[in-house]
Image (cartoon, grey):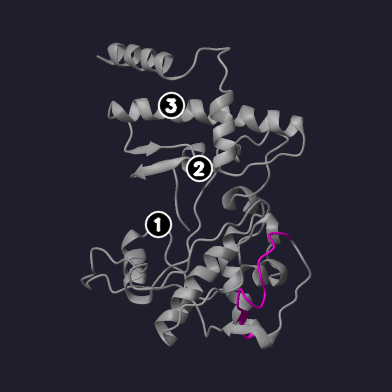
Amino acid sequence: MLLCGGLLTLLASALAFPPEGLSLDSEWEAWKTAHKKEYDGLGEEALRRSIWEKNMQLIEAHNQEYELGMHSYELAMNHLGDMASARDNDRKDVKKTHWLYVVGHMALPQGLDANSTFIPDYSEELPKAIDYRKLGYVTPVRNQGSCGSCWAFSSVGALEGQLMKTQGKLLSLSPQNLVDCVKENDGCGGGYMTNAFKYVKKNGGIDSEEAYPYVGEDQSCAYNKTGKAAEIRGFKEVPEGSEKALQAAVAKFGPISVGIDASLGTFFQYRRGEWQGGNHGD
């Protein structure tokens, strides 16, 4: 049966993906148009197209295995199709834009005491599901671009949820404020959310997105208290590896700041289903 499955997969791959030498020009042009892609010269476009074709092959092969029940999730081409995985770190075009990839050169945040860890009541009955988007706690999704600032977006997302919970107003806060001003992190080179929360607490607040707009690159710190939109009294960390503690924290407090390993190509091209990729959240 395993041999037959392998033969079926190979046959399907041969039928579904154009033979070597057959042009994908029309598909490439349609994709560029759909996602408004422009490149700096023919050299860059050739490089991006080679990555795009590799991702097309990955998607085709994966989805054929998905149809055979070998995976729990499906992939699809999207606007990230011309980006290489951070695990392809031998490629000269790969930028350090992924959280776990970029923070390897940074020391873990220090100075947290025992009271900084959230300890849930494990006997408490918790809701099986809660969707804070439907409750109005989540601002629209924003694009970080080529800046490795996911830590800043994750941090402000959690703060925005708390602002809604405590003051009843949903307001976009400034990830650029964090990128420029959290000196313990590395700006567009990556960072930890813990350092971001420590900064907001010590600084006495964080500006709104309107007052301190996102530009997607490192700048000098330009925080201005006249643009302050939120502040925090404290924060806690969820015990690593405890789904029960995470469930309790989400139910009790609201949206939680989480970092994930986004270095796998299958994460870039995720469409639907239960994604599994050797990941863990922090």
Residue 28, position in %: x, y? 57, 30
The first of marks 1 and 3 along the sequence is 3
Quadrant where the N terminus sits is top left
- Give the structural element (helix, strand or loop) at label 3: helix
Nearest to the observer: residue 216 or residue 105 = 216
For the question of whether residue 26 can be seen, the reply is yes
Q: Which residue is mark 3?
A: 60
- Give the structural element (helix, strand or loop) at label 2: helix
Q: Is residue 136 above or below residue 9?
A: below
Question: Pointer 3: residues within 10 angstroms few (<14), some, or many (20+)?
Answer: some
Which amino acid is tagged 3? Glu
Q: Which residues are magenta?
A: 204-217
Q: Main secondary structure of the magenta part?
A: loop
The nearer-to-camera label among 1 and 3 is 3
Residue 82, position in %: x, y? 60, 37
Q: Which residue is mark 2?
A: 268
Nearest to the observer: residue 192 or residue 156 = 156
Nearest to the observer: residue 118 or residue 86 = 86
Q: Quadrant of residue 84?
A: top right
The first of marks 1 and 2 along the sequence is 1
The first of marks 3 and 2 along the sequence is 3
Q: Is residue 20 above or below residue 127?
A: above
The dot on residue 241 is 1
